[in-house]
Image (cartoon, helix red, strand yellow):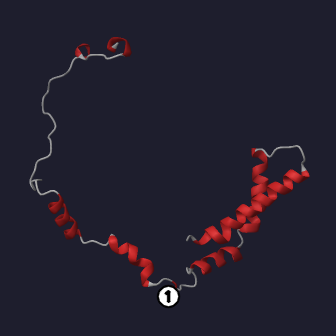
Amino acid sequence: MQSLDVSVYGPFKAYFSAAQTDWLLSHPGKVINILHIVALASKAYYNAFTIKSICSSFKAAGHWPVNSPIFSDTDFLSSFVTDKLLNEENNSDAVLNPHVEENSQSPQLSTSKAIVEPDRIERNTPCIIR
């Protein structure tokens, strides 16, 4: 879980929604447009992004103060699937593709100096294809 999602962004969303509701109630029949968004978001921002809420989000996630026992070994088990040595990866490729030669050459670029003239290039347009 991300640290700021619960303790900061969640309340920001709630404060922003409350600011929208307050504005709509105080301006009946009007619509919130792009010019009102900054004023509404600033109210929500100053309520949600406080030092207290940011610090509490890092404490809740175990990031501060450093709390290494918050995660057990089972929390890291999924990473063992990707923990492979480089030699193991090379051996697995050899098993999966036994017919691939180890010293196979890749295609080379042409060294021909012939120039293709523009009038010899066929133009395929929808009219010609029909």
Q: Nearer the viewer, residue 122 or 76?
A: 76
According to the image, label 1 marks what residue?
69
Please state if 62 lies on the left or on the right of 94 as rendered. right
Q: On the image, which quarter does residue 61 sit in?
A: bottom right
Identify the image quadrant of the C terminus. Answer: top left
Q: Where is 88 relative to 96, above or below?
A: below
Please state if 6 lies on the left or on the right of 70 as rendered. right
Please state if 1 lies on the left or on the right of 93 as rendered. right
Question: Hey, which residue is sitting farthest bottom in the picture?
Answer: 69
Q: Nearer the viewer, residue 116 or 75?
A: 75
- Location of residue 63 in the rendering, given as x and y in whole percent from the top left corner: 55, 79
Q: Where is 22 relative to 6, above or below?
A: above
Q: Nearer the viewer, residue 7 or 110?
A: 7
Instruction: Name the residue rendered at 76%, 65% in the picture.
Output: 46
- Location of residue 1 in the rendering, given as x and y in whole percent from the top left corner: 55, 71
Please state if 19 lies on the left or on the right of 83 as rendered. right
- Location of residue 11 in the rendering, given as x and y in whole percent from the top left corner: 71, 67
Q: Amino acid at mark 1?
A: Pro
